[in-house]
Image (cartoon, rainbow, N blue to C red):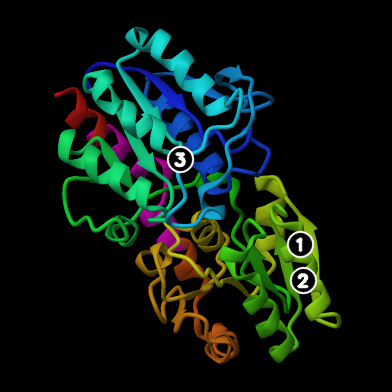
Amino acid sequence: MDKPLKLLLVSTPVGSLSSGLAGGVELTVLNLANILQKRGHEITIVAPKNSKLESFSIVEISGELQTSAQTQSRQDPVILPDNSVLANMWNYTIKIADQYDIIMNFAYDWLPLFLTPFFRGKLIHLITMGSLTNVMDRAVQDVIQQCPNSIAFYSHSQAETFGLKEGYFYLSSAIELSQYCFCSHPQNQLAWVGRISPEKGLEDAVAASVKTGIPLKIMGKIQDPIYWQTILNNYVDAPIEYLGFLSTEKLQAKLGQCRALMMTHRWIEAFGNVAIEALACGVPVISYRRGGPTEIIQDGITGWLVEPDNINQLVYAIQNIDKIDRYVCRKQAETEYSLEKLGDRMEQWLLQIIS
């Protein structure tokens, strides 16, 4: 871009940055902030209190965290808790909006979408999950009609859950490849990475681990302790080990030592950042043929796409995982998912908005 922009990134209200509560959104905020700052843009981040990101100016906002949308039913109304951090973040944003060229929202919530027309073309949104509630569907569709291209999605599969085929920007995702070490000779173990909550379907990966007898390393935030305990109760003798919520440095080291990553999501995964993290380590991905991972994994080349909710097909894919060339996995990550590629796409979107 000819002229650097002053950008305000308004993070998710479901958890502080670095807490793990926000899942893949945290990585997206960090990566976009990094690449845009490297390209000369001035970055400020608004996020819940106790957020931590090195090298960035963060305005920390106090308040009650927002309930994550994946815990709601389709018919649930919009709810704001007393002293809502979401409301407080946007109250602050409204007051300082004139100081910025573009404001980018990362919250999967009705309020910032509703506010879009009042920002007179300055407010854009990265929608971070697929369709979950009727009120969000309507809000997304309204913004697409009123302000075309002010909404971006990670994947076309994600956009389709809202009934959309046009009027949005395709952003995809990326990682800092230098932080991920390629591993050519893994140990005889599998990986599962993500928030531990029902929509992520961890129990299927555990069942496949039991059937194959191959140990499963589990990494991620325990968002639903009751769900996690149920899995432990149902699979008492399963060869599983929970490693916790890990930093990128520790995650890539553990992940790279695995023969494959399993993605067993029940819902339409908007993208699946962990898939490209695995590929960067040379780790093939076995995923249900559902949502964003279907646009990432090259079936039979960098992993296997299997029938959703079919444990026997997971087992078959595991048995054939050594047919996948780990060097090809790393090459795909380098070719398609570098921060430079993401920066190019992001600046293309920003140019559309300011012009």
Residue at the image position 70 percent from the left and 52 percent from the top: 221
Q: Which mark is residue 78?
A: 3
Vertical position of residue 14 compared to residue 271: above or below: above
Which residue is under mark 1? 226
In the image, is residue 298 part of the stretch drawn in magenta? no
- Of mark 1 and mark 3, the one earlier in the sequence is 3
Quarter the C terminus occupies: top left
Amino acid at circle 1: Ile
Quarter the N terminus occupies: top left
Regarding residue 45, the answer to whether it shows in the image is no
- Of mark 3 and mark 2, the one earlier in the sequence is 3
Inter-mark Cα distance, 1 to 3:
25 Å
Inter-mark Cα distance, 3 to 2:
30 Å
Marks 1,2: beta carbons within 8 A: yes
Amino acid at circle 3: Val
Regarding residue 157, the answer to whether it shows in the image is yes
Left or right: 319 as drawn, with respect to 152: right
Count of marks placed on residues: 3
Stretch of the chain drawn in magenta? 331-348
Residue at the image position 24 percent from the left and 35 percent from the top: 150
Categorize mark 3 by other alpha carbons within 10 Å: few (<14), some (14-19), many (20+): few
Query: Dot 2: what SS?
Result: helix
Query: Dot 3: what SS?
Result: loop
Which residue is under mark 2? 230
Nearest the eye: 44 or 62: 62
